[in-house]
Image (cartoon, rainbow, N blue to C red):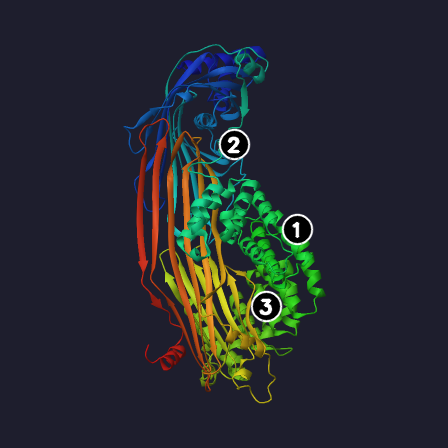
Amino acid sequence: MDFTSSATTDRFIHVYKMAGATGVDLKCLLCLCVLFYECYSINFAPGKTYKYKYETVVNFNEAVSYGKTVGFQLTTEFEIGEVFRASDTQLLKVQITSASISSFSRPEVKGELVKLIKYPIYFEYSDGVIARVYTSEVESIFCANVKKGLLSLFQVQETEGQRDEVDVAGECSAYYAVYGGKITKTKQNCQNVEIAGEHENVNKMFGVGAENSFVTHYEIADGIIQSATGSSRHSITINARPQLSAAVVAIQRLNYVGDSAGSASVAANDVTGALDLIYKGDAKKYQQMLLPSGSEVQECLENCEKPVSLLQTLKDDLTSEKLSKIPSGKAFIKLLRAFRNSGKGSIEEVLTHKDSYNIVKQLIDVAAATQTPAAHAALMQLITFTDESAIDYPERFILASAYTTHPGEYLLKDLLELMKKKVPNESLRESIALGMGAVVNSFCKPYGNCLEYSTIADYVNFIETELKACEEEECKLLYIRSIGNAGLVKLLPLLLDQARNSKSSTVSLTAIQGLRRMQISDFRDEVNQVLKSIFHQNKRTYDSSVRIAALEILLQNGLSTGELRNIVLSAMYDQSEFEVSTYLLKRLADLSQSDPNFRTILNVVLSDPLVNNYNLFAQKGKSSAFTGFLAETPSANCSYGLYQENTKTGVMKKSAMVVNILNKQATQPLLTFGIYADGIEALVGDAAEGEETTEATAGLSLTMMDVLLRPVEFFRGMSGLMSAVWNAPSEPVSALQGNLLLQDYSHKIHLSNGLIVDASVLGVASIDLSGKVSISLWYKNSHSVITNSGGLVIEGSLQIDSEELRSGIRFSTESEAYIDFQTDVDFAEMPVKMCLQMKRPPITSSQYVEKFEKSRHMKKRLTIKKKKTSSTPPVSYFINEKNSFMCTNMNPDQ
């Protein structure tokens, strides 16, 4: 301890008086003094004013690929001194005496922040911990936040260790490292005190990666903070496209200037009494505040319009013709932001406006994605579910709700009520059940076990009761599909029971497919036991499609060497379903190409010559399985799988295209569409003699972003086929359209200097799935084209949440693409000839970055813009060798 300093001397005298008053032996005086120094080493002496210089910088840039940095530097001088002391607690006053602001990238651009000087701020201080904070009731939130950031630098402890602190960034865990007379403070796990309105998509692929760091270095001498230098960095990165990123850095520098004589402390009984005396005679009283920074109350940050005003400029971009295009996605995001800042009346005004007549469905997309009680109430006011013939609006509402990122329980309650009412239209009833399941899944993901919510428990009880009461196949399928979308493990026994025991192959198949969203790792053995029993047909015979579905889940769950050996041997010895055996071998070979672990197990099985021989590989079926890449980028890969199952006569039974996105965070199912056909052999006169014929049926099943949508039936029976032949449209017809919300991230970042940064990301996929089918019974051929087209728009930003200082970074990306899936079938003679083709045109993607600085305290503004465009060439995708050979024979000129 330096006994030559005045501050130390003051403390020594104070301790000496304490010793005399309590009769402490003077021999213990030094020990008591040292103890006092260690416990209350940072202690502002009464009657003195301490002067400091404080600078803080906030700047913005990309988090990955850096460009020019923008932001502000705030420079102040202030005085701090004691105004009241009660025991070991001081009431300290901070008065800023000068404040100026300058551009970070243009130091010559400066201004004054005189409003920071006007009002002092008071705080309770004890043992390096700040308790309550007080300021004038007319102090602006911006000024209070800046001053709180300054105060937080005085929250420090001089002993090494960890403690929980509440500071300007929220509730944090702080660790102190002490070495060589210097202190380093590192903060982690800072949780904002106010989190209302914050949300994110819990789906990792469509989520946002956020990183935060807080470090402050101190030098303390003679009980006074001589200097403090702190920095905090916060970044956001789009998981699916890491090149889309932004970062904000806050730097603080505090330097001790000196001290001087100050006014004496006020005489009062407590802090409240002291503040009453300080503000006596002042019309503006003080207010108590929390140390964490508070958000400024604002209707809108910038360039915001009322939704009805935006409608005039966006209505042309929201037409059905613009769906799957970039303008549609951009219009969706603009209107979504406006809806989230609007009440029920404003949203109703847009939904019922005369200019909305042709775009109501797209407006329903926006209102459902808004995910506020006001928007939901406006939708429920607009949409009726009781008109059996008018289901366009209800269907669109259900579709949009199925992709909500953070649904409220009010949406669950209304959907469950609609399920229980059993609306009159059968198709709408099925859509409601599927949508309810999808919303349950989104609602439950953040919680793990969400059965504690009464609505979820009611849904489970309702499903269990209704499914057991079902006698018809369609009734069972409705609830099983809802379970599949919900993915609740609680309902797993129901699916396994239906998969194993149902007499309907469609029900068994749907139940197995319903396992796709369930986290069944804890029930793996139980699930695999049922699926192996189905695949090997231990107790009964199952349809080939059911067996293949069971196989797919078994491969996903993982198989032991022995289990895989038994499955492979089944392909060798069971030729009653040679198309299943053919599919099995193709699938195993395909999976071994992408999964090294599986390849190792398969190689062990095939090392046995009793397995690896001609009888195994000489399969005569045409079924196939193939996986390839739609696109490969440094950040993510997009794969496609083409799976085809044929009947014994060579006619296609099922075909499916599966598209997945893969990156370091996750694998996200993007799209699965399958064409199914039953009983077609009878139509082409090729049914096996004595074989029971099935009614001819064909249709399309569609799963979008792992949400099963209502299947579309092309025809059923000969009369349905004839109707499809004569009424087939000459132009493509849209089967699914909409703007679906993908990225949805909104958080407030509380910087260490007190400023608040708004972090926002919105991403939308504007989609149009269309197709046409032409069938000629005269020429005995068919031609179908399914077109998946979509536009992707992602917009994100980090910007200071204040009207005083406006600086930040905005980024966006946009692209359009489509894929044609074409099928040509010639059944004029046996065997049936079929050619599958999949093509994609060139894709152009654009990426934009904008950085800006502007303040009402500086005359010159700054905007920096950057654009990057990339393109990929067209491609025709390989399916398999047999298909290529068949296409060459059918189309020799191509």
**Amino acid found under the numbered disc labelled 2:** Val
Residue 97 at x, y percent in the picture? 39, 18
**Amino acid found under the numbered disc labelled 1:** Thr
Image quarter of the N terminus: top left
Q: Is residue 65 left or right of residue 155?
A: left
**Quick check: marks 1 and 2 in contact, CB under 8 Å?**
no
Where is 708 relative to 837, above or below? above
**Quick check: marks 3 and 2 in contact, CB under 8 Å?**
no
Q: Residue at x 58, y 14 (%)?
A: 273
Q: CA distance from mark 1 to mark 2?
A: 36 Å
Q: Residue at x 46, y 10 (%)?
A: 263
* Crowd rating for badge 1 (residues with CA inside 10 Å; few <14, some 14–19, many 20+): some
- Nearer-N-terminus badge (3/1): 1
Where is 306 relative to 843, above or below? above
Q: CA distance from mark 3 to mark 1?
A: 25 Å
Which residue corresponds to mark 2? 166
How many labels sit on residues? 3
Q: Which mark is residue 455?
A: 1
> Which secondary structure lies at badge 1?
helix
- Nearer-N-terminus badge (1/2): 2
**Amino acid found under the numbered disc labelled 3:** Thr
Q: Is residue 206 left or right of residue 432?
A: left
Q: Quadrant of residue 781?
A: bottom left
Can residue 97 be seen in this snapshot?
Answer: yes
Residue 48 at x, y percent in the picture? 44, 13
* Crowd rating for badge 2 (residues with CA inside 10 Å; few <14, some 14–19, many 20+): many
Q: Which mark is residue 510?
A: 3
